Amino acid sequence: MRIAIIGTGVAGSLAAEMLAGRPGFSVRAFDRLAAGEEAEAGTGLNIGPNAMKALRLYLPARHAAVRAASLPWKRWFIDTAAGERLADIDLLRVAEEPGIRLRWSELYRVLRAPVAPLTRHGARFEALEKAADGRLRPIFRGPDGALFDEGDFDLLMGCDGRYSRLREITAGPVTPRFFGVALTRLLVPDAGDAPLDDYGQWFNGHARLLAFRLPGGAAYVAGSVPLPTPEAEVPEAWRAPGYQAALYEPADAPPCPAVAWMCRMIRAMPGQTHWARLQESPILRHTLGGRVVLLGDAAQGMVPTLGQGATQAIEDAVLGGAVLAAGGDAAAVAALRDPRVDWVRRFSVDSTDTMLRADPVEGSRKKGQEPYLSRLKQLYTAIPEGLTRV
Ligand SMILES: Cc1cc2nc3c(=O)[nH]c(=O)nc-3n(C[C@H](O)[C@H](O)[C@H](O)COP(=O)(O)OP(=O)(O)OC[C@H]3O[C@@H](n4cnc5c(N)ncnc54)[C@H](O)[C@@H]3O)c2cc1C
């Protein structure tokens, strides 16, 4: 079977590694970026223990490589902005191994390295032609502006992210669902003096900061603030660092040291904050009668509340790849993945309650207790074993 993988981000790199070199499979991958361009990618992220379990079971060498490039994510605590502890979860109570925290550029570097020889870089997927026998011919544009192709493929894997061109061409434009929350992220490169380490969250009303240290002395600081309506754009005034920082500072008490430090960084780094809006897009696993399989954000843009976007992209690629490697088709990938992704998405949206409507203090306390902990355990451990031999 000749397979073309469109996009070598999180899902595409791992899907290529799962299938390359297996008898009966010929894999070619394409990405619009030049080789090594990942150095510019994003800020930091945390990846759940469930993705690490999937890697451990099916791609142990990649599991070891991402562990080596990251810090362990062992704990999740929730405080008020004034420093009152609301929840403190030891991840090993609800998972079989820690999650990880690392820089985006490092994740991409580690995942892309093993599939570099079968990847064509500087190949932006633009269009699709269908041969008389049903096989598909993806058309790419190179850095010089010229169109090219590499012939017909039996299966295309759409791993081209949230704004997937392959999904758009084969199933129409995606209509995202917005929830009315503005998101920010900031990388502080030199965070030597930061009074924080593992994954923490700090609430000031519904406004919330989230932060953790990254390898190499950096720290990741993310914010979320409710918008006036679900569809509202981020007001321009919020982008001013002084205004933004003030959203997280309690009116009636001094901020705890971690919040004071994060607000100082927000003020000291104008123009460095990336803004987004909390959103998700409907799940779509395959198109064109199963000739196209979608993985990761191309299949399921997720709200980032539980840090499950890249985490589910990893599950998708590893487990979906295992199904295909064992002879399954697009429908078999959907049968395995869609119920799980749907469950994770509902749990992620439920967990957004304290950022929007629910009392952030009481709601956060509940996250450190049953039944929330049982849901977390299900999230972090429910990875099927034995789908195919490694
Ligand atoms: C603010 C924010 C914070 C987040 N934090 C976390 C977190 O902490 N933990 C977590 O698990 N997830 C997080 N996520 C989600 C995460 O970013 C995505 O879910 C994840 O990157 C999806 O992986 P992917 O492989 O589907 O897509 P991507 O990683 O986006 O990869 C897509 C690839 O396709 C390529 N591509 C795109 N279009 C084309 C084209 N036309 N032709 C060829 N190549 C193309 C791109 O160059 C890229 O290499 C966060 C997201 C946001 C917005």
Image: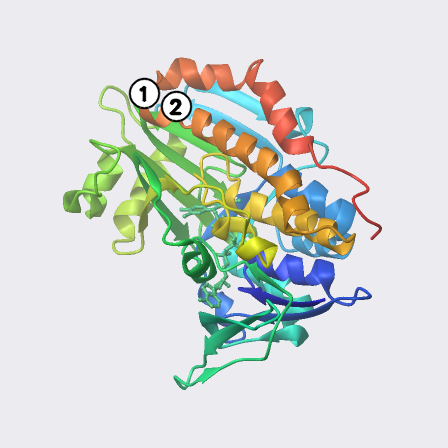
Q: Position of residue 230 (x, y in %)?
A: 26, 33
Badge 1: how crowded within 10 Å, few (<14), some, or many (20+)?
few
Question: Does any portion of residue 194 appear in the rendered image?
Answer: yes
Say if 366 sits above or below 117 in the image: above
Residue 244 in the figure: left or right of residue 311: left
Residue 204 in the figure: left or right of residue 76: left
Q: How is the image coloured?
A: rainbow
Instruction: Identify the residue shown where x is 70% and y is 62%.
Output: 17
**Which quarter shows the N terminus?**
bottom right
> Ligand 1 within 8 A of label 1's CB?
no
Q: Position of residue 328 (x, y in %)?
A: 73, 50
Residue 357 circle label: 1
Residue holding disc 2: 353
| SS at mark 1 in the image | loop
Say if 48 sits above or below 357 in the image: below
Q: Position of residue 319 (x, y in %)?
A: 69, 46
